Amino acid sequence: VTAMTAILFAHLAALALFMGLLLAAAMGDLQTYKIPNVYSLALLALYPVFALTAPQSVSPLLSLGVMAGVFAAGFAVYAYGAMGGGDVKLLTVAALYAGPHFAVEFLAITGIAGGMVALLMLNRPFRAGLAVALDSIGNRTLRDALLTDVIPYGVAIAAGGVYLTLRLVGAATDAA
C-alpha cells in the first residue's frame, strides 16, 4: 500500500463518515424534530481530516467563506422562524465540505429535496395513508412524524449531503 493509497483511503473514510453523520442527523430529526449539536460538531471536527487528505484542490479559506455565507443566510431564515437552529448548523457545516466548487449544487439539491419534503407534508391524505401503513407495521415513530406539521429539514440536508458525498468521491478518485 503506497502512501498515496493510504491517504486516499483516509479521505474516502472521512467522506463515508460525513455521509453517515448526516444520515444519522436526518433520522434523529425525523424522530424528534431536533438535530443535536453533536452531529454538527462531529462534522466540524472531521473537516481537517477531509481537507488534509483530499487529493483534489480544497481551499479551506474559501470554504470558510462559503460556510459563513450559508450561516448568515440560514440565520436570517431562522430569525424569520422558517428553519430550526439545528438545521441551520447542520447546513452550515455541510456547506464547509461543499466549498466553492460544489456549494451551488449542494444547496440546489438540498433545496429541491426540502421542497419535496414540504410537498409531502402538505399532502395530508397521502400522509395519513402512509401513517396508517407505518402504524400497521409497528413504526410509530415515523407515523407520528408524518402526522405533525413540522418539516424535518434535516432529511433534505442529508439528501444534499449524499449527493455532495458522491460528487466529492468522484472528484477525489479523478484526482488520485
Image (cartoon, grey):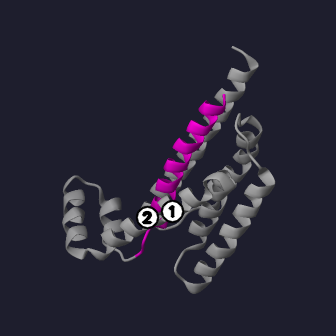
Q: What's the residue type where badge 2 is placed?
A: Ile
The residue shown at (29%, 63%) is: 143
| 48 horizontally vs 166: left or right | right
Q: Nearer the viewer, residue 122 or 128?
A: 122
Q: Position of residue 92 (x, y in %)?
A: 65, 63
Q: Does 169 appear above or below 116?
A: above
Considering the image in quadrants, where does the N terminus appear? Answer: top right
Q: SS of the residue at dot 1?
A: helix
The answer to whether marks 2 and 1 mark residues whose Cβ atoms lie closer than 8 Å is yes
Looking at the image, which is closer to me, 45 or 59? 59
- Residue 80, position as x, y percentages in the image: 57, 85
Q: Please indicate, yes or no, whether residue 5 appears anywhere in the rendered image.
A: yes
User: Looking at the picture, which amino acid does disc 1 mark?
Assistant: Ala
For label 2, the crowd category at 10 Å Cα-Cα, with few meaning under 14, some 14 to 19 and many 20 or more, is some
Left or right position of 126 against 113: left
Residue matched to label 2: 112
Tell me which corner region of the image, top left, top right, bottom left or bottom right, holds residue 133.
Answer: bottom left
Q: Which residue is mark 1?
A: 108
Q: Position of residue 144 (x, y in %)?
A: 33, 67
**Residue drawn at 73 percent across, 49 percent down:** 45
State which region is magenta: 150-176
